[in-house]
Image (tube, rainbow, N blue to C red):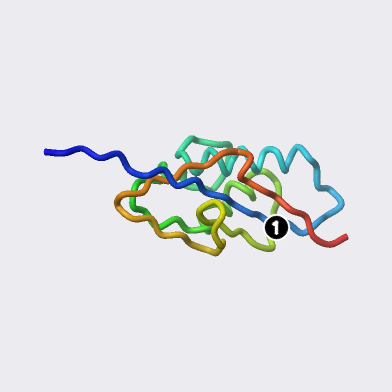
């Protein structure tokens, strides 16, 4: 029997939020932390959200799993969430093979504001 380690696939996540009067930098930092926690299956403070499990080898990763972590941080005016392997095009889902394991650095979570 032979054992092979999966290839680590670094991810990037982009969130676009509509700028609003009550938006705080603390909420943005909390949203990034919540997204990272969600990616790795670590609980975060949220009401009415199922705590997801860690992303695993060979999974299809959906951007929709990150709406609740962003909303839980107080950022409810979400314009878009996109993700993908770092350096590749982003979209609403990314498929991994059974030889690939997802990873995420906090620096690869970008939250942008749009509007006034």
Residue at the spot x=20%, y=37% of the render? Answer: 3
Q: Is residue 48 left or right of residue 15?
A: left
Q: Position of residue 25 (x, y in %)?
A: 79, 40
The residue indicated by pointer 1 is 16
Q: Position of residue 55 (x, y in %)?
A: 41, 46
Q: Residues within 10 Å of mark 1 (few under 14, many from 20)?
A: some
Residue at the spot x=64%, y=42% of the render? Answer: 32
Count the marks: how many? 1
Q: Is residue 59 left or right of residue 78?
A: left
Q: Is residue 109 left or right of residue 52?
A: right
Q: Most extreme residue toward the left, as rendered?
A: 1
Work out which quarter of the rendered image holds the N terminus and state it.
top left
Residues 97 and 14: in front is: 97
Secondary structure type for disc 1: strand
Q: Is residue 3 above or below residue 112?
A: above
Q: Position of residue 40 (x, y in %)?
A: 46, 39
Q: Position of residue 13 (x, y in %)?
A: 59, 51
Residue at the spot x=58%, y=37% of the render? Answer: 45
Work out which quarter of the rendered image holds the C terminus and state it.
bottom right
Residue at the spot x=67%, y=48% of the render? Answer: 110
Q: Is residue 84 left or right of residue 26?
A: left
């Amino acid at each position: 029997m032979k054992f092979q380690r999966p290839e680590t696939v670094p991810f990037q996540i982009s969130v676009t939020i509509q700028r609003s009067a009550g938006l705080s930098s603390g909420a943005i930092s909390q949203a990034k932390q919540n997204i990272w926690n969600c990616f790795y299956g670590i609980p975060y403070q949220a009401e009415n959200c199922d705590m997801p499990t860690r992303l695993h080898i060979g999974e299809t990763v959906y951007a929709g799993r990150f709406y609740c972590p962003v909303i839980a941080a107080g950022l409810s005016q979400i314009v878009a969430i996109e993700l993908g392997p770092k350096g590749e095009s982003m979209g609403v889902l990314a498929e991994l093979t059974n030889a690939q394991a997802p990873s995420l650095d906090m620096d690869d979570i970008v939250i942008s504001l749009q509007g006034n």
